Amino acid sequence: MGENRGLMLFKLVILLSLSTGALGYRTGGFRAFYFVQQWLGSYCNQRGTVCCDPPTGKPKPDFTIYGLWPYYNDGSFPYNCGDDNYDVGRIKYMEKRLQQSWPTFTCPQIGRKFWVHLWNKHGTCTKDILGELAYFEGALYLKNKVNILQALARAGIRPDNRFYSLKSIKKAISRSTGGFHPWIVCNTNAKGNKQIWQVTFCSDKTGKKLIQCPYLPGGRGNCDNRIQFPSFY
């Protein structure tokens, strides 16, 4: 997949957090959400990765939703929090918006089963506060609230395969959200270049109000001082 050791370590940390998440669910303490967007150009150009267009065709260039993950007071990620009678028909009215803002690029395409999976894995852990509709509406609301591509363009940072300073990227995104600091995760493309991949913010329990993330690591993370912003896939 072209991932380096730093990204593998990041994934291990997430997996370890997830391993404690089920216990967190039993003891309570749902605090807020991680809201994660990704740049498909960086996901699809990794070595060994194959992306397939969604049924609606190739979307216009934009960051798309990667996940809306609840986290608890101790920083753990709950997941798979019990069975739920998921009615995919209930979200039919927002399906076009989900296809645009929260698509899947897996091969072969799995259609609505993608959102069923998301709800079963993450949404069920919020159902006491946010039901099925509110969970997806919250993610779509945050997507409109945090327009990463527009924020970067205003600072002259564009998906043109050039390298930009990580500091300037964070500053541009933070400025557009009124001072909320993004957590940026990089991956490595087939040529070995570090590139912007995921941008994470935190929101409160309503899924509509941004907050500062108390548990995200500071500093550079797994990115270099200068990272590539590849063209759309």
Image (cartoon, helix red, strand yellow):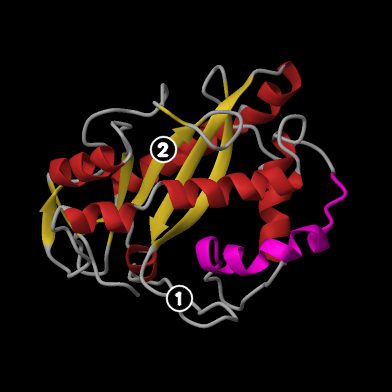
Principal secondary structure, stretch drawn in magenta: helix
Task: Locate residue 172 relative to residue 94 in the image: left or right.
Answer: left
Query: Is residue 112 or residue 221 the one in the foreground?
Result: 112
Residue for point 40% across, 74% down: 60
Query: Badge 1 local density, few (<14 within 10 Å), some, or many (20+)?
Result: some
Q: Is residue 120 above or below residue 232?
A: above
Q: Quadrant of residue 112?
A: bottom right
Alpha-carbon span between mark 2 and mark 1: 23 Å
Answer whether residue 89 is magenta in the image.
Answer: yes
Q: Quadrant of the C terminus?
A: bottom left
Note whether residue 43 is visible.
yes
Q: Quadrant of residue 41?
A: bottom left
Position in image of residue 167 (x %, y %): 15, 40
* Residue for badge 2: 201
Q: Quadrant of the N terminus?
A: bottom left
Residue for point 44% across, 43% down: 11
Residue for point 59% across, 44% down: 138
Give, as a three-letter code, the residue at label 2. Answer: Phe
Q: Secondary structure at mark 2?
A: strand
Give the magenta-colored segment's residue range.
Answer: 84-104
* Residue for badge 1: 59
Residue for point 53% across, 68% down: 100
Query: Is residue 200 or residue 172 the one in the foreground?
Result: 172
Q: Secondary structure at mark 1?
A: loop
